[in-house]
Image (cartoon, rainbow, N blue to C red):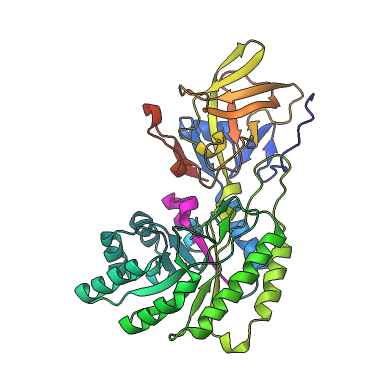
Amino acid sequence: MTTTAPKHAPMNQFPVRDHCLVIGGIPLTRLAQRIGNTPFYAYDRQLMSARVQSLRQHLPEGIQLHYAMKANPMPAVVHHLAGQVDGIDVASAGEMKVALDAGVAPENISFAGPGKSRQELSCAIAAGITLNVESGQELETIAQLATETGFQPRVAIRVNPDFELKSSGMKMGGGSKQFGIDAECVPAVLQRIAELKLDFEGLHIFSGSQNLRVEAIQEAHEKTLQLGLQLASISPLPVRTINIGGGFGVPYFPGESPLDLSATGNNLKRLLADVPSRFSSIRFVVELGRYIVAEAGIYVCQVLEKKISRGQIFLVTNGGLHHHLAASGNFGQVIRKNYPVVVGNRIGTDETEKVSVVGPLCTPLDLLADRMELSRAAPGDLIVVFQSGAYGLTASPTAFLSHPAPLEVLV
Ligand SMILES: *Cc1c(COP(=O)(O)O)cnc(C)c1O
């Protein structure tokens, strides 16, 4: 190794046998043959279950755990997790259908997101799921639909807090936002829900995503609880649930290390222990997407050609940004950094070289690894991108350049 570049957090969630990565008990080369085609995404069901168990172990007892399925909406994944979490959070009527098909009870599904269409709202009301209301106007539409259909909608208020989750990969609350109802306007909306005699579930406060810092998450939890309880104390209707969001991150880039879940859970235990007893009937919910699924998934593509251009080695593969936008650095990154990438059938071999892994698209943005020190690879070898179980396939522009879409398997 000649490079002194900072290393990735160890990607040791998958075993390695004879230099080959093993996923779901199957060596990668054999899995590729079983699937019959590259590229593909593979998700390990046991790693997902282990992650849920670890959350149960470290988070306060009695707190509810929801899966935000936009992170990975593959029906088999949603079905697998449905039996292990307390609820599924959806962001469209399409996701709602997958959650219902997976057998999730409507009372355990909640639907957040701005710009819900009248038709989506109508479907959700008929399904009997909880609607996280994002604006005063949305509330009025829901009330109209209640009158028209005769069904009683269950609503929660998505609150845009007056603070944000610090050092977060993606800020979703605080300041001016398209998400939720500004905290200072919530009292009037609570009154309106009481007037309209809607079934009121509670409050939803989500401040950000992809955070690896225990102190930042603790601060957000503290302020979220404070705001939630303050609103609960002035609410004319009883608050049954407060969803305090999530935002737990996973390490992607050199220099990042995993979130300390034990410390995060202990902080939350202390905060919940301090909640005054008059609020003892309120259920608290944590909603997580990425943290549950990201590390359980890999993206796999195949080297087609090794090309040298003025001394720089390119591994040209059949995969790229059209399948995995995030790994190319074009999904929310300011400065492009490499995802953890390995040659999946040559792990730990002595011979390495500095290469760039690229895809077949006609754009220099189609880059999966930029000058990384990888095991020496040849055409036919399998390139693996770790941390690909969340915001992978469905967050990518698969139609760009009209290549076939990759397959997905849950093993
Ligand atoms: C996207 C989203 C989540 C999930 O965020 P992750 O970073 O994947 O955990 C949770 N809640 C809401 C409201 C979201 O929009």
Coordinates of residue 209 in the picture (x, y in percent): 57, 55
Coordinates of residue 181 in the picture (x, y in percent): 44, 67
Coordinates of residue 116 in the picture (x, y in percent): 34, 59
As drawn, is 50 to the left or to the right of 242? right
Q: Is residue 389 visible in the rendered structure shown here? A: yes
Taking 70 as reference, is 20 above or below it? above
Coordinates of residue 234 in the picture (x, y in percent): 50, 84
Residue at figure coordinates x 56%, y 68% from the top left: 244
- Quarter of the rendering containing residue 122: bottom left
Camera-side residue of 377 and 361? 361
Camera-side residue of 349 and 89? 89
Q: Is residue 403 visible in the rendered structure shown here? A: no
In the rendered image, residue 65 lying in the magenta stretch gets the answer yes
In the rendered image, residue 230 lying in the magenta stretch gets the answer no
Residue at figure coordinates x 49%, y 73% from the top left: 184
As drawn, is 20 to the left or to the right of 42? right
